Image (tube, rainbow, N blue to C red):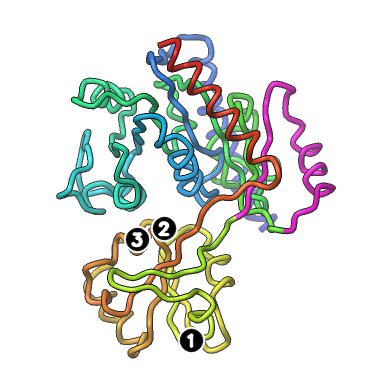
Amino acid sequence: MNLLRKILFPFAVLYGFITGIRNFLFDRGVLKSYSFNLPVIAVGNLSVGGTGKTPQIECLIRLLSNQYKVATLSRGYKRQSEGFVLANENSDALELGDEPFQFYQKFKNIQVAVDANRKNGIEQLLSGSIKPDVILLDDAFQHRKVKAGLYIMLTSYGDLYCNDFILPMGNLRESRSGVQRANIVIITKCPPNLSLEAQNAIKKELNLSPNQSLFFTFIEYDEVVYSDKKTLKADEVKAMDKLLLAGIAKPESFFAHLKQENDECLTYPDHHHFSESELQEIKKKANGRIIVTTEKDFVRLKGSILSRQLYYLPIKSSFFSDGDSFDKYILNYVGQSTRNS
């Protein structure tokens, strides 16, 4: 690994130089950023994938959607459509991408849109028949053509950005200094029993500025697994003979939560679109057993030949003792921005 890093070091320096120049030009106003007259919250990270953006967006939806008209705007990674798309009853994961389609399926009182051009996407949402009160930008920390009012940056407990390197030497999309744009930094996927002492050690290591807020979250698994037609208690499922299936970044914790000695685990790339031959192979390997997958994979697999034996386990992002402070921060920002607009 050390030899490989040495080989990739010049490329990382070049990539860091390019992204650094780009950020400098945006910071100095040479490249234009666009602001909008409503609260816009951008959720993202410095690293490539696997930091828990989807459950964090869902956390914000739960917090805001009973009080405000909420819209989510995503790129729609690996979707088979182009331009701006607003989700409707005929939409599916192929048109929207798996994560936006998951939002649409799960939260019926919000608007879900996709557009690689976030500026255009916001303009389209604001010109629609239902103007949102607040827009949540999914995976938009590096999308600097839009200037959000609030930036939330995520970094995984087991892979902190401060210990990582720029692509291709490491997994960072830009220099670690990019964290300075964040109003809130969230350490995701922490052990549920993470001590206050350990949290303070991480806080010291990150050395954030006084005007930045730091929070810690862990993944909380549902007590029930779901199919299209029925539910099973997760504890009962753990004891069953089953096949576990994941096409997400860093699925290890999902497998560890459910796996028993004789269970088989199948791993596919993040956002993977399953071919018919792959579905046939999965069904053959399951050999009549139930198949448990992630919620993100389920939205791509529902309606396939696996449907009768397919279940998913939902997750959510849960805060440690300071969750009320996070909620207050978000509600104060949205409330004040809404009044000002």
**Mark seen at residue 272:** 3
Q: Residues within 10 Å of mark 1 (few under 14, many from 20)?
A: some
Q: Amino acid at mark 3?
A: His
Image marks 2 and 1: residues in contact by CB distance under 8 Å: no
Q: Who's the residue at 57% across and 32% down the image? A: 16
Image marks 2 and 3: residues in contact by CB distance under 8 Å: yes
Q: Amino acid at mark 1?
A: Met
Q: Residues within 10 Å of mark 2 (few under 14, many from 20)?
A: some
Residue 140 vs residue 279: left or right? Answer: right
Which residue has dot 1 on it?
A: 240
Q: Which residues are magenta?
A: 193-218
Nearest the viewer among 180 and 148 is 148
Q: Is residue 204 within the magenta segment?
A: yes
Element at badge 2?
Answer: loop
The percent coordinates of residue 64 (x first, y second) are 45, 34
Q: Distance from label 1 to label 3 (Cα)? A: 26 Å
The percent coordinates of residue 219 (x first, y second) are 58, 56
Which residue has dot 2 on it?
A: 270
Nearest the viewer among 340 and 263 is 340
Question: Relative to residue 317, is residue 125 depicted above or below?
Answer: above
Question: Relative to residue 135, is residue 320 depicted above or below?
Answer: below
Q: Who's the residue at 62% across and 53% down the image? A: 218
The first of marks 2 and 1 along the sequence is 1
